[in-house]
Image: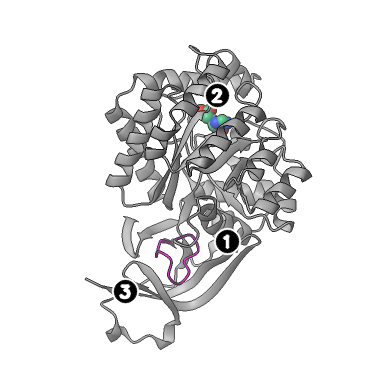
Amino acid sequence: MPKTICFKNIGELIQVESAGPPKIRIQRNCALVVKDGQVLDVLANAGIRPKSYDEVIDLKKRSVVPGFVDCHTHLIYAGERKEEMVARIQGSTYLEALEEGGGILQTVRETREATEKELYLGARKRMVKMMALGTTAFEIKSGYGLDYETEMKMLKVGHKLRKSLKVPITLTYLGAHAVPPEMNKAAYLETIIGHLKEFRELADGIDIFCERGAFSVTDLRRLFLQARLMGFQIRAHVEELSHSGGCYHAARLGALSCDHLEHALPKDLRAMQMSGTTAVLMPGVTFFLANSQLPPVHTMIEKGIPIALATDCNPGSSPVYNMQTVLYMAAHMYRITPEQAISAATLGSAKALGQEEHFGGLLPDQQADFLVLKTDDYRDLFYYFGDNLVQTVYRKGNVLSGEQP
Ligand code: NIG
Ligand code: FE
């Protein structure tokens, strides 16, 4: 049955009009009208006629922002990596752990052993927590199998999550995350390419970790040229710990997003600008790995490159669930404004998934995915560190998590 809901008495309503350059619109003392799960209109609070709606909900002067879109996660995995964390605090590095057969490969061993049900329950629990903290759409990568069966198992779990949770989930095949111990790199890359068709049935996108100790620019080009023919969305882990040139080539091959980018050079940014590729930034990784190099965020913004924020939630480089924490870190580490950070975590992140027409901005005709904050000032998200300021999470105009104000 068609249903029209009026969310009245909004203290401040944030809509995101653009992600590149970031631009938000703030309206005060207004009402948001939602029809069949989509934004219909924004009205002055004084002008609403309650009788014309099926339901009227009083938001008690709170701040309303679009739901967060987490466009880069590795949420399906087994085990944790706390020994690695403690070793790193004492001076070892992320890539040393991988070289010694730990790091990503430790999670691979544990994920191979886990059943589909165990992986499903673990990921579901994480996502429920993330939704309560304000995330209303996700991207999830495979990449802890590095063999056909386990990669398939991970993507099947992704589909089960899609069925059971009422949020959009984009799935990405990340077979090229690391080289499995039982194979050499060239042979493994050929098996990935040989199975692309089967993986395309389960995954929307393809990804690669282009870095010393993982895959090269030549591997990236070989993989993406094939994947592109099969209609995979292209995204890539590039220029994270060193400069490889992967960003330039991924952008030239039409990447929807290039992710990390701490070591990106002007030439890489020019390629992204030309191709309309979104830059996905993940301050949680920089913080957790104690890296000093920050991505050239201000140049990206000046060039009109859309920027997105994501958790990169994973057990090795970013065990963070909370997009509020990511927004906070982005503003203070990158020195970007609250408005720029909000735009990146919502519409920018939706753009990185090719979904910006459907959600992200809380704009007319987009899905009504939004957060009612515990405050009447969205800047509190950037002021109080470590607090949870999300009171209620709405997805398509219905409560997804939390208590109605
Ligand atoms: O995005 N950089 C490579 N991949 C992940 C980390 C995965 C892991 O360490 O388990 C990342 O940081
Ligand atoms: Fe990642």
- Report the Cα–Cα distance between label 1 and label 2: 32 Å
Disc 3 residue crowd, few under 14, some 14–19, many 20+, Cα 10 Å:
many
Disc 1 residue crowd, few under 14, some 14–19, many 20+, Cα 10 Å:
some
Disc 2 residue crowd, few under 14, some 14–19, many 20+, Cα 10 Å:
many
Q: Nearer the viewer, mark 2 or mark 3?
A: 3
Residue 123 in the image: state x and y as whole percent: 36, 36
Whether residue 311 can be seen here: no
**Which residue bears the numbered disc 2?**
85
What is the span of residues highlighted in magenta in the rendered image?
Answer: 359-370
Residue 275's place in the image compared with 104, above or below, is: below
Q: Earlier in the sequence, mark 2 or mark 3?
A: 3
Q: Which mark is residue 5?
A: 3
**Element marked by disc 2:** helix
Whether residue 263 can be seen here: yes
**Which residue bears the numbered disc 1?**
379
Residue 274's place in the image compared with 99, above or below, is: below
**Element marked by disc 1:** helix
Question: Seen in the image, is 305 located left or right of residue 157?
Answer: right
Residue 367 magenta: yes
Q: Where is the N terminus found, in terms of image quarters?
A: bottom left
Q: Earlier in the sequence, mark 1 or mark 2?
A: 2
- Report the Cα–Cα distance between label 1 and label 3: 27 Å
Residue 50 in the image: state x and y as whole percent: 31, 84
